[in-house]
Image (cartoon, rainbow, N blue to C red):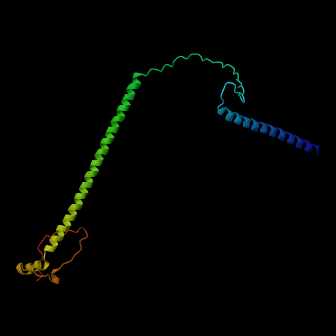
Amino acid sequence: MADYRNYRTTSHRSYAANYSRTNHYRQTASRAGQVERNRSAYIEGNTARQLAAEPRRRVEERPERQVHRRPKQEPIQMPEIHKASVFFLMLAVAAVCTICVLYVSAENSVQKQKDTIVQMQSNIADMKESNKTDYQNILDSVDLSEVYRKATEDLGMVHAKKKQIYTYEDKESDMVKQYGEIPDAN
């Protein structure tokens, strides 16, 4: 129990000490505000009293810094570049530039060929359309009944009879060659 009371009184004492410190700061700040207000007012004459003098500032003495001096360094010498290394570097740069120029040239050539192919495909499509139109015009201009009339009347053609038709199968090719006269089947 004594420990508890002792703790409580110690705690109470520290609170009181803190309160008095805080209260002191408040009063000091309040006085500083009054002094500022009073200083801003104009008072005539040289016998005017000062309301509150500013406290002297403490000047802290700092120990002198010791300057550490480094020994002076010699400038670093760059190693010499061998002529063979420079020659090899220039040769490599020239090779890379040449390869780049050749690559750009090849790309340009490929692009021109693609453009030519596209143009040719467009021309082919136009020609196919023109051919279809012309073929249809030719088919429309031919009258099959007129062809039949000319063949039968003017040229004397007749329809083949069943006995005149010979059928056979050729398994080797689709082309038929005639080596002799076809016999008359009348």
Question: What x and y, as percent, mark residue 141?
Answer: 13, 73
Q: Is residue 124 above or below residue 173?
A: above
Does residue 186 appear left or right of residue 71 in this picture? Answer: left
Please indicate whether residue 15 sits to the left or right of residue 30 in the image. Answer: right
Where residue 57 sits in the image (x, y, percent)? 70, 26
Give the residue displayed 11% in from the left and 77% down from the top.
Answer: 147
In-image side of 44 versus 144 (left or right): right
Foreground residue, 113 or 59? 59
How many numbered badges does the structure rendering display?
0
Figure quadrant of the C terminus: bottom left
**Residue nearest the observer in this picture, 41 or 101:** 41
Q: Position of residue 80 (x, y in %)?
A: 45, 20
**Vertically, is 25 above or below 54?**
below
Query: On the image, which quarter does residue 8 sit in?
Result: top right
Placement of 79 over or under 98, stated as above or below: above
> What residue sits 20% from the left and 61% below the top?
127
Query: Picture quarter containing residue 121?
Result: bottom left
Query: Which corner quadrant of the image does residue 46 belong to?
Result: top right
Instruction: Please report the residue visible at 19 percent of the width from the left and 64 percent of the height from the top.
Output: 130
Q: Residue reaching furthest left?
A: 154
Q: Position of residue 174 (x, y in %)?
A: 22, 69
Towards the viewer: 110 or 57: 57
Q: Nearer the viewer, residue 26 or 174?
A: 26
